[in-house]
Image: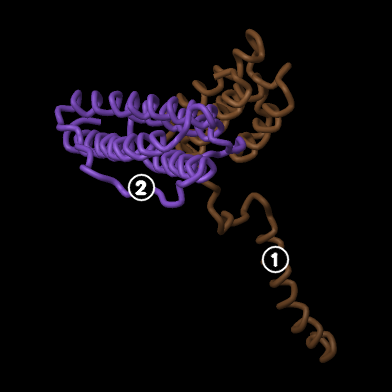
Amino acid sequence: MLSRRTAVAVAVVAPMAASACSASEMLDPVKAPPPSTPPAPTNPDQNVIDATVAEILGADEGAPAAFVHLHRVHIEALAPSEGVTAAPAQGRWQERQLALVTTLTTAAGSAADPQLITLLASAAAGQQQLLHGRGLA
Amino acid sequence: MTGPGMAATDSASTEAIQAALAVEHAAIYVIGALGGRTSASSTPALARALEVAYADHVNAREALAVRVVAAGLEPVASSAVYDLPRRTGSAEGIGAAALRLERDTTATYLSLVPKATGTDRTLLIQLLCRAAARQLDLGAKPTAFPGT
């Protein structure tokens, strides 16, 4: 038979123990409920973005600083996936800059999102402006 | 895509081409008028830039009209007259008006590009690039995103 003091102590501890058990269950990573925020949807144009950025990076080698700076601005706006690497550089730097206008135009032609299409088309025009200013187009 | 959805896409694309054609009609009129007020002897660089711009706009008009005809439609006609820019009494004023026109043309093309599809979109981007390049001939500095 429990003394009065012991009975009171058990009465107080029992709900705490039950509560602790519930908390333990909630913290179990295996039984954790799904997060309330759903994962961000995959951008259907991400492949187009990443392939374009790889070409832009590939055009940097040997190019004057003005082109490299313009490319940085374009890449930042395009928001590529992490770890995108430069496509292999081919030909002279001038040829790569000219080819980049075609790359951006083609990418704008295959993108689905109107905002991305606008961004790529405007980037192509920016590249064309710089080429024109240097007498290359 | 096939059926009505495809037809709607084609229609929107051709409408974008027609809108660009209307822009070129106006540009040809305005650039022609500005060129007529420009002295090739006292301002040869400006006169040359306007000549090149005029030829470019005519070529653009032809390319766009061909595309509309290929789609089985009647190309939009030019108006009889267009509003001319004010303050064109000096070479500076003429150059500034021509630059404004090319900036507006660039912005219009950029707004039309997403509405077009396939080769129509490619053509509009090519004409957008030409318009952006012409801005430099008229004294503009290059920008990262022309037309925005």
x then y, percent, for residue A109: 41, 28
Where B110 sits versus A14, above or below?
Answer: above
Judge if badges 1 and 2 mark residues of a common chain: no
| Chain B on-screen colour | purple
Q: Quadrant of the N terminus of chain B?
A: top left
What residue is shown with label 1? A23
In the image, B39: left or right of A21? left
Q: Residue at x 74, y 76 (%)?
A: A16
- Based on the displayed image, in which of its 4 quarters is residue A128 positioned? top right
Q: Type of residue at label 2?
A: Leu
In the image, B132: left or right of B121? right
Question: Chain ID for label 1?
Answer: A
- Based on the displayed image, in which of its 4 quarters is residue B112 positioned? top left
Q: Type of residue at label 1?
A: Ala
What residue is shown with label 2? B84
Question: Chain ID for label 2?
Answer: B
| Chain A on-screen colour | brown
x then y, percent, for residue B20: 32, 37
Q: Residue at x 56, y 32 (%)?
A: B136
